Amino acid sequence: MFIGVALELQPSQQMTSESTGLVFICSRNTDYPYAEVVYQFLVSAGLPVFFSRESLPELGISDYRKQIDRALDEAEHMIVVSSSVDNALSPWVEAEWGFFINEKRSGRKTGNLITIAVGGLQPAGLPPSLRYFEVIPYDPAGLDKVLRYVQQNRKQGPGSSKRNADAKSLTGLHEIAVFGESPRICAMAVSGSLVATGGFNGAVRLWDISTRRQLAVLFSNLFRRSNNEGMITALAFSPDAAYLASGHIDGAVHFWSIEDKKETEISLLKHEGAVGGLSFSPDNGTLTTCGKDGFLKIWNLQTLVQKHGRPRIHQKPAPLSGLLYTQKGEKLICSMSDRETGRCQLQVHKAAGSYPVLTTINLPDFHSTLAASQDGSVLAGGSPNGSIVLYDLRQSLEELDAGEKPRSLQVQRQMSGHRKGITSLSFLPNGKALAGTAAEGPPIIWDTHSGKEITRPRHEPEEAYVSVAFSDEGNRLIAALRDGRIRVWEFLTRQQA
């Protein structure tokens, strides 16, 4: 049986709602001797550490469980100590680091997740969700590195990890990887260490950022049987990264199991026009698709996996070009964009029951792509002329909650710097910066508070980027080039420059 984490805290280290920097050591009992060394090393440096080995005999089972849950809830950092893949994947160990990763993705935690690899354990053998974060060898130099990671965030204070770094502290980008030789890319999705790219031939390629290797090529049997090659217009991972959905220009939507690399063969997903957007709800309960045919389809994920059931369907008066759920999954926002009329509207649905429309919001400009900050406070719209507009989304959502029906969004600021139409937008997880790509030129990182450009990477004149995304940590930028390559950069802070 696994028991995850550290000794009962000393009086000076007792957890309170105001304490910060708590380190949670996660380890299977067979790895306790190594975890004990890590624990003693960190405690000797004056850090608050939670590790259950010595406190377990002194606690009743109910108290023990409460203390584990409390420590998981209050921990700022997690260290997984493991000597084998089996130990890292033992049920209770995986449950703890899986919980921590989900908390980071939701924005509730901002600290480091570090795996200490003991003996011959290689990073490539670890689950993708773990090896996406730091993997450090179990040796004196490795322990010193762990200490620096944890102490740096502690000295900076609560919520000041790289993920929550002030946008003004970012001075540049350091390229750390260029990989991929796939056919031309037209869509990309990122989840943890996984990157999915979609090409003009209808195939999806799955990559691992940490190893820079291609994991699989997903080519639909349904697609092959139809003898039709149509480019991919949208990609989306489920929140738990267990599934991937791909939307195509011919209206087809394919649904994949990441673990099995297999497709769920359901033909009911077909739209009559190109797929405009895909989105999984934050609770992993639904997959929503929309198309140029004006149809919004909302699928129960459980019935989809079981290969039966029908979606809720809403028909709109205009082509649908994008979807997003609010942070808590209470509302679904779909965008209606008509290039012929130049109109762009948002319809906000209650994400429950029959998904009724709460209001329709008119935007002043036509936007080819939209993105929302993780906390749902800001909406960014990218235009065909290369400009980006930031809107106050929070105010309108609050008005909805108060029973009002807002019809417009207040413009916060506008940024200009891209030479061609915007192809993709992505917010830094804390919302303080926005990355954009255009049909020509490099990605540009913008300060969302001032509207000023922060930095842009070097690029060759002929390079064209089709999609961009920040990592879950917010310390990396991933971008897909139309020629099939994927670029990854790490941010430089003023201290590193």
Image (tube, helix red, strand yellow):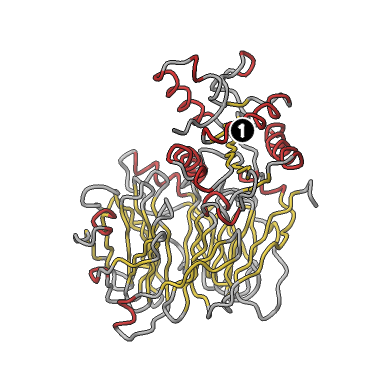
Given residues 157 and 344, the one toward you in this image is: 157
**Is 224 situated above or below 308?**
below
Specify few, some or many for label 1: CA neighbours under 10 Å numbering under 14, 14-19, or 20 or more: many
Tell me the quarter of the image containing the N terminus.
top left
Residue placed furthest toward the left: 309
Q: Is residue 299 left or right of residue 381?
A: left
Give residue 440's position: percent from left, percent from top. Answer: 62, 76
Give residue 295's position: percent from left, percent from top. Answer: 27, 67
Give residue 99's position: percent from left, percent from top. Answer: 46, 40
Given residues 199 and 220, the one toward you in this image is: 220
What residue is at 33 percent from the left and 53 percent from the top?
Answer: 348
- SS at mark 1? helix
Q: Name the image quarter holding residue 485.
A: bottom right
Reading the image, the residue beneath label 1 is: 35
Given residues 373 and 451, the one toward you in this image is: 373
Give residue 260's position: percent from left, percent from top. Answer: 38, 62
Tell me the amino acid under the disc marked 1: Ala
**Is 223 situated above or below 216?**
below
**Is 335 situated above or below 319?**
above
